[in-house]
Amino acid sequence: MKSTSIHLARPPMPDIRDWKDIDADWLTAALKSDGIEARIASFEAGKVGTGQIGDCVRFKLNYAEASPDAPATIVGKFPSEGAESRATGIQLGNYLREVKFYQLLQPNARISTPHCYFTDVNEETHDFVLMMSDMAPAEQGDQLAGVTLEEAKLVLKEAAKLHSAYWQDENLDEYDWVMGTTNAPDVLDPDMIAGLWDGFKARYADRVTPEAMKVGDALSRNMDSYGESREGQKCLIHSDFRPDNMLFDLSNKDKPVTVVDWQSFGYGPGGADVGYFIAGAIDPATRQANESALVDLYLEELSRLGVSDYDRSDFLRHYVAGAYQHFFTAYFAAMLVTQTERGDNMFFRMLNGAVDLISDHDALDWYG
């Protein structure tokens, strides 16, 4: 007797579209792609967050029918509506990179992230969509306000989770969309980097301090030396590890900090994430009084998670390099994204915080 196999058809996958073109059927399909049985009757949508490269939208869902695990709200991320910001996201591969993170690396990354219901990217046009769990009542951090000491400690524990998950994992070198791998293209042209710094100085001449001028002049023309200061142990790093890319809910003991915005992650030194974060998120006086204890906390947590070969001297070199990266990111992004008043203030908070940390570690002359 001939056997018959029954193949259940998979639900159609949603296409990639602008958030303004999303309808109830599309949202239903997005949830079904994650195994959630529901039918959405209507919804409300509105922008949230302060992203520079991508736009986030919260969808409040009204169901015709729904399983118990159907979310009341979800958050979608899309390419920026600002032409300059969108062009930057495409040029630097940010949109492709974030989708790949959620598709391939997030399941083993240990760090707290939103749940991803659906994500996809057109690798030719770089149009993308990322539908995530809504972490409310968690609130987005604020680069301008910084973080409390308690929040900083929680963030550093999350950093240790991420770094330990892919510590010295050479398999990452297979991916050309992970920055810093052997197969990743070099998207940062030295002449462009120097030109952006010159443009930044011209635009913000009245706000750039003499110390910042010294750091920027040296760094922008010595990127090879900067790269050498980051050599050593490598792991998966966030690379834009700052409060604006974190959601805080200290009442949630299981998930007090959630890290978002995985557009710039790479394969590099874990200490750079730590220096990058501390330089811009903690005011100089608080940092100076607590810096050693915060470094100890991170290294102890990293060791607890199985990493035993990160020498403190190597960490501190990477830590200061992270402050330089924070400085570089501030002027680089300021010249490539759509200019706003908040953006300008944020970039100078980053720039000056980096200079303070670099100066405190007697590293103003690192690159000449």
Image (cartoon, helix red, strand yellow):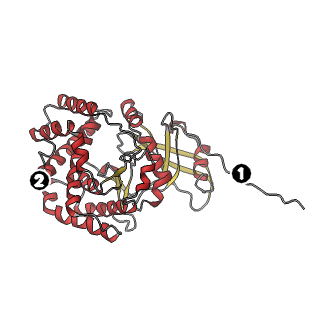
Give percent across and percent down for residue 100.
Answer: 47, 48
Which of 197/248 is in front? 197
Q: Residue at x 54, y 36 (%)?
A: 21
Task: Tell me residue 243's x, y (percent).
Answer: 29, 52
- Mark number displayed over residue 360: 2
Nearer mark to the viewer, of 2 and 1: 2
Task: Using the image, determine if residue 256 lies above or below residue 12.
Answer: below
> Residue 92: x and y, percent?
38, 38
Q: Amino acid at mark 2?
A: Asp
* Amino acid residing under circle 1: Ala
* Quadrant of the image containing the C terminus: top left
**Residue at x 19%, y 43% (from the top left corner):** 351
For disc 2, the neighbor class at 10 Å (few under 14, some 14 to 19, many from 20) is few
Quadrant in the rendering for residue 147: bottom left
Identify which residue is drawn at 10% across, 51% down: 362
Residue 318 in the image: state x and y as whole percent.
23, 54
Q: Residues within 10 Å of mark 1 (few under 14, many from 20)?
A: few
Q: Quadrant of residue 220?
A: top left
In the drawing, what numbered circle is on residue 359? none
Kindly indicate whether the residue at mark 1 contacts the one at mark 2 (C-beta within 8 angstroms): no
Write down the residue under mark 1. 9
Left or right: 112 in relation to 154: right
User: Residue at image x 41%, y 62%?
Assistant: 110
What distance separates the C-alpha of mark 2 from that of mark 1? 62 Å
- Secondary structure state at the residue bearing disc 2: helix
User: Does 325 sit left or right of 49 as displayed?
Assistant: left
Examine the rendering and report whether any part of residue 73 can be seen: no
Can you name the residue that lies furthest to the right here? 1
